[in-house]
Image (cartoon, rainbow, N blue to C red):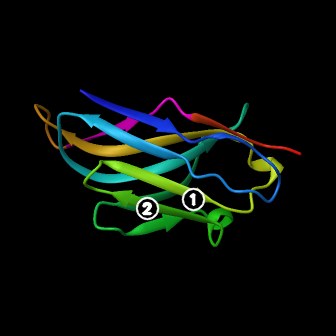
Amino acid sequence: QLQLVESGGGLVHPGGSLRPSCTASGDIVHIYTMGWYRQTPGKERDLLTSITSDGNTNYRDSAKGRFTISIDNAKNAVLLQMNNLEPEETAVYCCSASVWVQGTWGGGNYWGQGTQVTVSS
């Protein structure tokens, strides 16, 4: 019914930048929010940032000032600009979305497979 596909992860040096993206596809009636989580082995998945379809954003404290989330409603996509990355931010970055899919009632929560981000010299 709905797919979230991330891209744009990779290897970056400490202090570098990456800009992963996530695109939703399927029988979409409305996207309420999209967001990014970060997961490292042995730890819970942490919400980094989220954005509503009308542009309201929320950021985890550690992301404020360095990360920027944006949404492209026409493309059903969310972007995450990450600057000044640190080695401890090496993780799988997962996209999430609250979406009303055709044939369902209201909004459901969906997840992408994630994209690996490695910060290393």
Indicate the quadrant containing the C terminus: top left, top right, bottom left or bottom right.
Answer: top right
Q: Is residue 6 left or right of residue 87?
A: left
Q: Give the range drawn in magenta.
A: 107-114
- The kind of secondary structure element at disc 2 is strand
Residue type beneath disc 2: Ser
Q: In which quarter of the image is residue 16?
A: bottom right
Judge by depth and name the residue closer to the eye, 44 or 115: 115
Which SS type dominates the magenta stretch? strand
Q: Name the residue at 37% across, 58% down.
A: 71
Membership of 108 in magenta stretch = yes
- The kind of secondary structure element at disc 1 is strand
Mark before the other along the chain sequence, 2 or 1: 2
Distance Cα–Cα, label 2 vs label 1:
8 Å
At which x and y percent is residue 11? 74, 40
Q: Name the residue at 28% across, 35% down.
A: 25
At which x and y percent is residue 57? 43, 67
Label of residue 114 in the image:
none
Q: In this view, does 112 lie to the left or right of 91?
A: left
At which x and y percent is residue 108? 27, 39
